[in-house]
Structure formats: structure tokens, C-alpha cells
Amino acid sequence: MLIGAHVSPAGGLEKAVSRGVELGADSIQIFNQSPRMWRPTKYGDDDFAAFRQAREASSIGSVLIHAVYLLNCASEDPEIRAKSLTSLTHSLRVGDGIGATGVVLHPGSAKGGDADSAIKRAGAVIAEALAESDRCALHLEDTAGAGGTLGRSFDELAALIEAAGGAARLGLCLDSCHLLASGYEIGTVEGLDATLEECERTVGLGRLHSLHVNDSMTPLGSNRDRHAPLGEGELGADGIAVFLSDERFDELPCVLETGRDDGRLTAADVALAKRLRQRGLRDRTGQNR
């Protein structure tokens, strides 16, 4: 597992690599532009080359881009959908340029409207963004289920993939906090097994390409997206250890998004995640004896 962290590309894309290395990360995630602004950051071939050179000289094994929070590919407003298409396409093209493993996307929200229609709208935008970019994969992130957000279940994620044309470039990013909040008991070996078996039946584990590891401030089935530092939420150290040690997640990039220092991630947070993974692996070995 490539345990890493969300880092800033401020000052130049290549700066994100050195920040990841400073944290002891094996993978990094970045925003390709301000997460709360529509205006894209313009990058050119020199920026991409500098990033690739920095990464090749580092221990960073995987890079994710997180699409900005403003996107709602499922919006009923044609202007919002058009802006979402432009921004998502830009993210994928930056992903092409830097050799990213994938772009992580919150699929959108029905905003209280009909979910089936919202899924069709989101699928059309996603399909067009893929058609306007070359290689970079798109990872649909599961959601906590608040406010009509799409992707709260594997059935909805499967429907989104189908609505987007089922391209091979489409995959999943599973977030531990979101899974718990949307009703999946992932804090025990048995619960995580059941969750991944459902994922296999409905979507297929072959489409599972990345992970977010976050603890949750709110309990199972709360439908509230509130991250907590690792070990300090409803999953706790035991639940996080279970999540990180599942062999079906081996070799996937697994990114932390929430730290202890005012939410800022530190090397201690990444080190804790790696220790919890090792603890979980030892516990599983003991259970199998």
C-alpha cells in the first residue's frame, strides 16, 4: 500500500513532490487549482516536465489529483454543468501531463431532485470530459450521503459508471470516513469483508484504484461528512488498522486528508497510518494462526 498525504502545489507543481517526501509519503494528492475557485491554474509543458523530473528522483510511487469542490456534474443548471465539464477536463489534462494515477471526483448532487435523472446528467458530463482528455483515469469517490450527494452506495456508483459509458478509465476511490457515514461497517474484519464483497458484486474490485483514509467524527450511518484525525473518531485506531491492512488494498495509493495540527498533515500523521497498517497486518496474521 502506498500510504501518503494530500499536499499543496503552491509555488509550482514540483513543490508538491518535495512536500510529500518531507512527510514520508509514498503517494501524494493535490488540487490542480484552488479548490474553491472556478478559474483554472495554467500549466505548460515546462511545469509538467519539472514535476515528472522531481517525482522520478523521489520515492513517490503514485500521484492523485482531486477535482475541485465546486464541481457538480449532476446539476440541473446548464451553466454549472458547463463549468464542471471545463474544470474536470482541465484536471484530467493536468493528470495526463504529470502522469497522475487518476483524478478523484465527487460525482455531484441531486440537490433534492430525482437521483436517476441526476445520475444521467452526471454521466453525460463525465463521459464528455473523458472524451476530451487522453489517458488519465477518473476515480469516482464514494460519498457520505448528505444533501442528495451521489455515490453513497455501490449501486449508485455502478449506475454512475454505466451512465458515463463504462469506460475502462473509470474507477473508484473509497474513503473510509464516507463509507462509515453512509452505513458501511468497515471497522471490523467481518464488516469490511461484507463491504468489499458488495463492491465486487456491484462494481467489481478491478475498478478500485485509490483510497482515502480518514476517521469519522460522526457514527455509522450518520450521512455526515466530518473527518477526524486518525484514531480519534468513530473508527478509532482499531478500525483504521482493519481498513489499512486488507490485502485487497495492497499496492493502492492511500491518501490521508486530515491531520491533528489544525487539520494540517504532518510526518507524524503519515507515520501513524503506516504503524496502524502494520498493526492490522499483525492482528490478521494472529487471527489466521
Image (tube, helix red, strand yellow):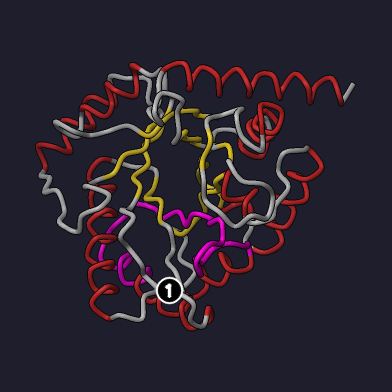
Inspect the magenta stretch and tell me whether residue 238 lies in it. Answer: no
The residue under label 1 is 123
Residue located at (13% from left, 37% from top)? 47
- Asked if 100 appears above or below 126 in the picture, the reply is above
Lateral position of residue 193 relative to residue 66, left or right: right
**Residue at horizontal 41 percent and vertical 51 percent from the top:** 104
State whether residue 56 is above or below residue 165: above
Q: Residue at x 64, y 32 (%)?
A: 240
Residue at far right of view: 289
Circle 1: residue type: Gly
Look at the picture and state if 191 lies above or below 149.
Answer: above
Q: Position of residue 282 (x, y in %)?
A: 75, 18
Closer to us: 194 or 135 = 194
The one of 232 and 241 positioned closer to us in this rendering: 232
Magenta residues span 126-154
Q: Position of residue 281 (x, y in %)?
A: 71, 23
Look at the image and say whether residue 131 sits in the magenta stretch. yes
Q: Residues within 10 Å of mark 1 (few under 14, many from 20)?
A: many
- What residue is at 45 percent from the left and 53 percent from the top? 139
Q: Secondary structure at mark 1?
A: helix
User: How many marks do you count on the picture?
Assistant: 1
The quadrant of the image that shows the N terminus is: top right
**158 horizontally vs 189: left or right:** left
Residue 175 x, y percent position in the rendering: 54, 46
Give residue 190's position: percent from left, percent from top: 82, 42
Compared to residue 29, the image places residue 175 above or below, namely below
Quarter of the figure that contains the C terminus: top right
In the image, taking residue 54 as reference, residue 122 lies left or right, namely: right
